[in-house]
Image: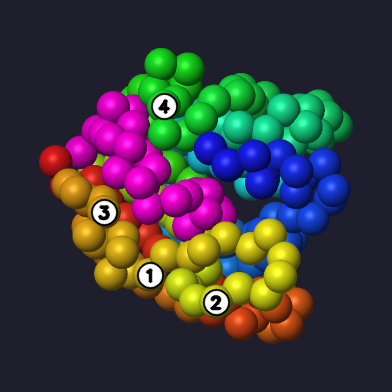
Amino acid sequence: MSTGYALAYRLGLTPWEKAGRDAAEQFNALLDREQQGEPPLDRALDIGCGTGDHAINLARRGWDVTAVDFVPRALEAAQVKADDAGVQVRFVQADVTAMADQVGGGFGLLLDVGCFHGLKPRQRPAYVQQLAAITRPGSTMLMLAFQPGRRPPAPLPRGASRQELEATFAGWSVIADDAADTSCMSAPIKKTAPHFFRLRRDT
């Protein structure tokens, strides 16, 4: 994984985290759809969890949550937030392209808010291979990804299109593709045209 993320957290330059928080209302609606009004009894994994906002949200909803990130500083902040919120989240430091042994398996829901779209092209197939090891047919992934394009001089991820997801996620189907509500987001983030994707593992 790039050391750029570690530097960004050290400097406090994490616009992807703010983008995820700004899309909280829409994200909660997507989680409501996953739960369909029933308390979840499944395992959830927040991939690239950052400082833990979404992992904590899942735990509050009743999911059995594991959250993984590569940056120790982010995980330390996430643990403090979880403790303050009074929820149980298992935080794991690992490279998401080689995380299966550390996080375990049997996950029914995966959450990726700003992780995959920041990976380099050579890292993406390894990431998907890890997903095959930790999920089962029928597992769901919710992903927030910026659309590909030129980025301003800030630590913004490279982005990922629906076509790139369909080409990379072998054994998965993209079953929903919704533009994120950017009305509360900063101008640089609006230009990335973020989308929420819902993927389902087929095999």
Q: Over which residues does the magenta segment extend? A: 112-137
Q: Earlier in the sequence, mark 2 or mark 1?
A: 2
Q: Is residue 189 visible?
A: yes
Is the Cβ of the residue at disc 4 closer than 8 Å to that at disc 1? no
Q: Earlier in the sequence, mark 3 or mark 1?
A: 1
The residue under the point 59% across, 23% down is 92
| Other-residue count near label 1 (Cα within 10 Å), few / some / many at <14 / 14–19 / ≥20 | some
Residue 98 disc label: 4
- What residue is pinned by disc 3? 168
Q: Nearer the viewer, residue 81 or 152?
A: 152
Is the Cβ of the residue at disc 3 closer than 8 Å to that at disc 1? no
Is the Cβ of the residue at disc 4 closer than 8 Å to that at disc 2? no
Q: In this picture, is 117 found above or below 92? A: below
In space, the residues marked 2 and 1 are separated at their CA atoms by 13 Å
In space, the residues marked 3 and 1 are separated at their CA atoms by 11 Å
The amino acid marked with disc number 4 is Ala
In space, the residues marked 4 and 2 are separated at their CA atoms by 28 Å
The amino acid marked with disc number 2 is Arg
- What residue is pinned by disc 1? 161
The percent position of residue 162, horizontal first and vertical second, equals 33, 69
Is the Cβ of the residue at disc 2 closer than 8 Å to that at disc 3? no
Does the magenta-highlighted stretch encompass residue 6?
no
| Other-residue count near label 3 (Cα within 10 Å), few / some / many at <14 / 14–19 / ≥20 | some
Element at badge 4?
loop
Does the magenta-highlighted stretch encompass residue 136?
yes
- What residue is pinned by disc 2? 150
Q: In this picture, is 59 found above or below 200? A: above
Element at badge 3?
helix
